[in-house]
Amino acid sequence: MQDRIEIIGRNTIIQHGEHNKRVYLIKLDEQDIDQVTLLLNKLARDEGYTKIFCKVPAWAAPLFNADGYIMEAHIPRFYNGKVGVSFMSKFLNSDRLLGIEREKLAELSNLIHEIDPDEEQTDKGKEDVLEMEPAHAEEISAVYREVFKSYPFPIHDPGYIEKTMNENIRYFGVRDGSKLIALSSAEMDREAQNSEMTDFATLPEARGRKLSRRLLAHMEEIMAGEGIRTLYTIARLNSIPMNKTFLGSGYSFSGTLINNTNIAGNIESMNVLYKHI
């Protein structure tokens, strides 16, 4: 039951469906600015969704504010190192807005206050980080199926993995011998010079070895070589170790997306973190 990606208006890209019970505006076409909130409202109302979530240039944020949206996160200099991005959300059900994990937010606050990136070292370990290829798609999706009961995009499907490899996503992995034990990906927007560092997964028996930190450090080097200027992630609030990985690698906390994403079997809140390189 995966949400589908569609075009609305002239060329605005959205994802929507019952899986996340939301509409997600992925990429706004400037030509649609006068009608986009009307289109989103109608779709959400017709389908009975409880949230509309939008990633838009900062200059568009006031127009969304005027339609009842709130800003949940903001990244400066997101597009080509110049224009910021605002994560704007409209809640259509009070339960979705109010059901926030307060204890986890307090834990996150303490982590942000206490962590010192200069003291966090990446353990090189004995395993190398490898870039994955289309031939590994089945193996990759098998790891994701074991780690995540649900996910906002169909990474459980080898066909999806192979398709995205041929588009704008590069996957990286760590092996222990011949066994693939950890994964991550970099979803690049070369035109806007930014990349989402995402899809981190480590098999249960390999956790505690800082493999995500090693994957992240390797991907940062690769992205710098690709001319990427801004890195960001949308990490689970409930996964404090994953947040620690990014904060310890010099990423800044940008905001929390409340009850935003169906991942690991439930709709969870997500944290936005970013880093300029």
Image (cartoon, rainbow, N blue to C red):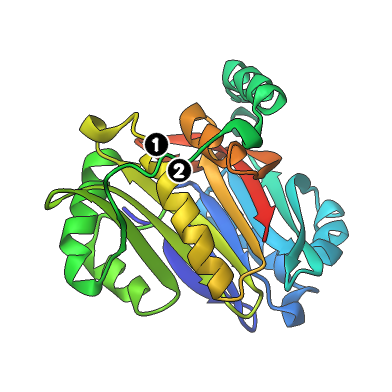
Label 1 neighbour load within 10 Å: few <14, some 14-19, many 20+: some
Please give the residue where the numbered disc 2 appears in the rendered image. 213
Side (left or right) of 87 relative to 68:
left
Check if mark 1's residue and mark 2's residue have beta carbons within 8 Å.
yes
Name the quadrant containing residue 113: top right
Helix, strand or loop for disc 1 = loop
Q: Nearer the viewer, residue 271 or 265?
A: 271
Against 64, residue 212 (above or below) is above
Q: Nearer the viewer, residue 191 or 38?
A: 191
Please give the residue where the numbered disc 1 appears in the rendered image. 210
The residue depicted at 60 percent of the width and 54 percent of the height is 232
**Type of amino acid at the residue the image marks with label 2:** Arg
Name the quadrant containing residue 24: bottom right
Helix, strand or loop for disc 2 = helix
Residue 200 visible? The answer is yes
Alpha carbons under labels 1 and 2: distance apart: 5 Å
In percent of width and height, residue 191 lies at 63, 80
The residue depicted at 31 percent of the width and 53 percent of the height is 1
In percent of width and height, residue 110 lies at 67, 19
Residue sticking out furthest to the left: 178
**Type of amino acid at the residue the image marks with label 1:** Lys
The residue depicted at 59 percent of the width and 25 percent of the height is 99
In percent of width and height, residue 87 lies at 70, 52
In percent of width and height, residue 138 lies at 16, 61
Q: Nearer the viewer, residue 125 or 59?
A: 125
